Image (tube, rainbow, N blue to C red):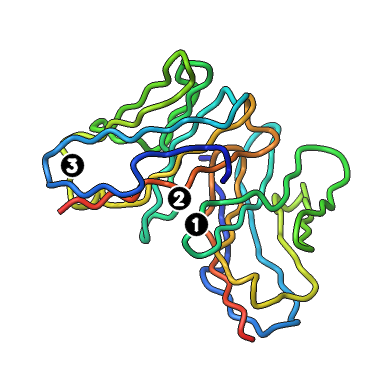
Amino acid sequence: DSGVTQTPKHLITATGQRVTLRCSPRSGDLSVYWYQQSLDQGLQFLIQYYNGEERAKGNILERFSAQQFPDLHSELNLSSLELGDSALYFCASSVVGGSYGYTFGSGTRLTVV
Amino acid sequence: AQSVSQHNHHVILSEAASLELGCNYSYGGTVNLFWYVQYPGQHLQLLLKYFSGDPLVKGIKGFEAEFIKSKFSFNLRKPSVQWSDTAEYFCAVRERFGAGTRLTVKP
């Protein structure tokens, strides 16, 4: 157990639907990062939040959004889902800016049918 | 554009062989460099990190990496691999990851 908790572990949904993925960072970590891992795209950085504020943005689609709440947990919202959104979504956390590396959760496997 | 490149997609070695996985990056300013490992069915784990000081860094499980600033490289090495090293290895610069290198070690 890395200390980063992601729920749910698996999610199957239909095209056009909306889902929310949840992440609780390791105790003491203020930054949360979201990644999408697929076979053809590798590990793609989506977005980073630090203490409730958006800090950096990567290859995140407009259909996707995220937020970090006062208790530091984060949610990634995926809407108008397409087959190509099927992937493993990882959350990672770090103390501040990530100079010491990130701690990853076990991921949420999303399957869009 | 900021990027992280890993040269090899899949490397196959026999046990006891030496390993070197290449990583080059294109980044301005201060870089924090990392190697992560992902064992089959598991989450990514930090192998080692560099942000300043001695450019040769040692990590867990006998891995080491060398930061060569002039070559924008941060290659991962291990003198003698084991079957249990079979995994996917990712180089990262700050929050950006390379595409990964799958290592298969044959017993």
Please indicate whether residue A40 sits to the left or right of residue A96 in the image: left
Pointer 3 chain: A
Which residue is at the front of the view, A109 or B105?
A: A109
View extreme (top): residue: A70
Q: Are labels 2 and 3 on one chain?
A: yes
Pointer 1 chain: B
- Which amino acid is tagged 3? Leu
Give the SS element for disc 1: loop
What residue sits right under mark 1 in the picture? B99
Which residue occupies 57% across, 22% down?
A30
View extreme (front): residue: A1
- Distance CA(mark 1)–CA(mark 2): 6 Å
* Residue contact between numbered discs 1 and 2, judged by CB atoms under 8 Å: yes
Give the SS element for disc 2: strand
Which residue occupies 50% across, 65% down?
B40
- Which amino acid is tagged 1? Ala
- Distance CA(mark 2)–CA(mark 3): 19 Å
- Distance CA(mark 1)–CA(mark 3): 24 Å
Which residue is at the front of the view, B1 or A34?
A: A34
Which residue occupies 33% across, 35% down?
A21
What residue sits right under mark 2 in the picture? A43
Q: Which badge, 2 or 3, comes first in the chain's sequence?
A: 2
Question: x, y (%) of residue B73?
Answer: 70, 53
Question: x, y (%) of residue B105?
Answer: 62, 79
Which residue is at the front of the view, A47 or B43?
A: B43
* Residue contact between numbered discs 1 and 3, judged by CB atoms under 8 Å: no
What residue sits right under mark 3 in the picture? A81
